[in-house]
Amino acid sequence: EIQKQEKKEQEKKQAKQKSEQQEKSENTSVKDTSQTTESDSMQQDSSVTTETPSSTQRKGRKRPVKINGIEYGSIAEAAQALGMKASAVSYRLKSDKHSDWYYLS
């Protein structure tokens, strides 16, 4: 039982590290793409875009979750740690069949 707890803590730590690495890589990619020239800016202004923002941009919040006794800072973090799609994690969080999957706030 102690080994199980240690394993869970290790998985949680790994998930946190992966999340931090992902955030760092996202931050650097945002910096790289934000550097535009004046002509790029004018082209962007003159064109109409119909892109929709991603779900994280729309909601702008991360809800912590607890899955099988392990806390994750967000659905994305949990999905990455568990090797699942975020939509599958979200579905299970809402499902009555998975009582050990729930939102913390």
Image (tube, rainbow, N blue to C red):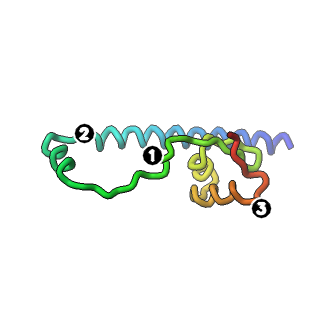
What is the distance, in whole Å, between disc 2 and disc 3 at their CAs?
47 Å
Identified at 60% across, 49% down, the residue is: 75
Going by the image, does 83 lie left or right of 94?
Answer: left
Kindly identify which residue carries mark 2. Answer: 35
Residue 56, percent from left and from top: 49, 47
**What number is the disc on residue 57?**
1
Locate residue 92, reporting x and y percent.
69, 58
Q: Residue at x 80, y 45 (%)?
A: 4
Amino acid type at mark 2: Gln
- Precedes in sequence: disc 3 or disc 1: 1
Seen at 58% across and 51% down, the residue is: 80
Task: Judge whether 25 appears above or below 96 on screen.
Answer: above
**Quarter that holds the N terminus:** top right
Tag 3's secondary structure? loop
Mark 1 Cα shell of 10 Å, populated few (<14), some (14-19), many (≥20): few
Dot 2: within a 10 Å radius of its alpha carbon, few (fewer than 14), some, or many (20 or more) residues?
few
Marks 3 and 1 sit apart, C-alpha to C-alpha, by 30 Å
| In this rendering, position of residue 91 left or right of residue 51 | right
What secondary structure is found at the residue carrying circle 1? Answer: helix
Q: Amino acid at mark 1?
A: Gln
Residue on which the image places disc 3: 97
